[in-house]
Amino acid sequence: MAGAGGKPGLVIIPWYATGFKGDAIEAALNEVAPIALRYGAGSYAVYRARDDRYKFQQLAYFDRHLDWERYWEGPEMIELRTRYSGAYQVPVLYGWWDLTVSGGLAEEPVAIGNGQGNGGGNGLTNGHTNGVGVREQV
């Protein structure tokens, strides 16, 4: 089963940590979020609210709803929900979102190098943007 209209979609999972568990939930989400790539996600991100440090949004972009279900019901996510039971509020009500518009300004990548203009020959750049709009360091 695909997302609405058979299109790829972004899954947004709102998490809310219980008292004094914000840092533990952040670490756990940061560990489990990249595993979505193994299940077919094209990108992932975890955001922590600035005005409420107990509030998190976990995002993952999937081409197929079935891949999302495999991730959510996979052993890593079951382990997270079991191990941190009591450290976040329940229920956790995720949603499947369809993109309606997107945009942004392209930034020039910064070459990592030796100052000789050849980037040290490693071909790496610093500061690209992934599929959910998060700047990553390479």
Image (cartoon, grey):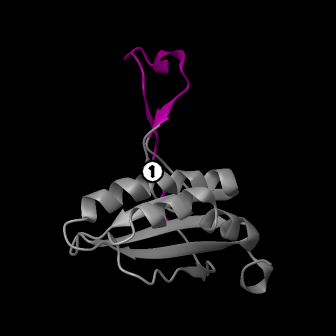
Q: Main secondary structure of the magenta part?
A: loop
Q: How many marks?
A: 1
The answer to whether 137 appears left or right of 34 in the picture is left
The one nearer the camera, 72 or 100, is 72
The one nearer the camera, 96 or 102, is 96
The one nearer the camera, 115 or 32, is 32
Q: Measured from the top left, where is residue 32 in percent x and y?
A: 49, 54
In the picture shown, does residue 81 fall above or below 28?
below
Q: Measured from the top left, where is residue 88 in percent x and y?
A: 35, 73
Q: Residue at x 19, y 66 (%)?
A: 20
Q: Amino acid at mark 1?
A: Glu
Q: Measured from the top left, where is residue 7 in percent x and y?
A: 75, 77
What stretch of residues is rendered in magenta?
104-126
- The quarter of the picture where residue 57 lies is bottom left
In the picture shown, does residue 35 fall above or below 54?
above
Q: Secondary structure at mark 1?
A: helix
- The quarter of the picture where residue 76 lies is bottom right
Q: Residue at x 46, y 80 (%)?
A: 92
Q: Residue at x 42, y 61 (%)?
A: 83
Neighbourhood count class around disc 1 (C-alpha, 10 Å): few under 14, some 14–19, many 20 upward: few
Task: Name the residue beneath numbered marker 1.
Answer: 31
- Give the quadrant of the N terminus: bottom right
Q: Is residue 61 magenta?
A: no
The answer to whether 43 appears left or right of 25 in the picture is right
Q: Is residue 122 magenta?
A: yes
Q: Measured from the top left, where is residue 120 in percent x and y?
A: 47, 16
Q: Residue at x 68, y 70 (%)?
A: 69
The answer to whether 5 appears left or right of 101 in the picture is right
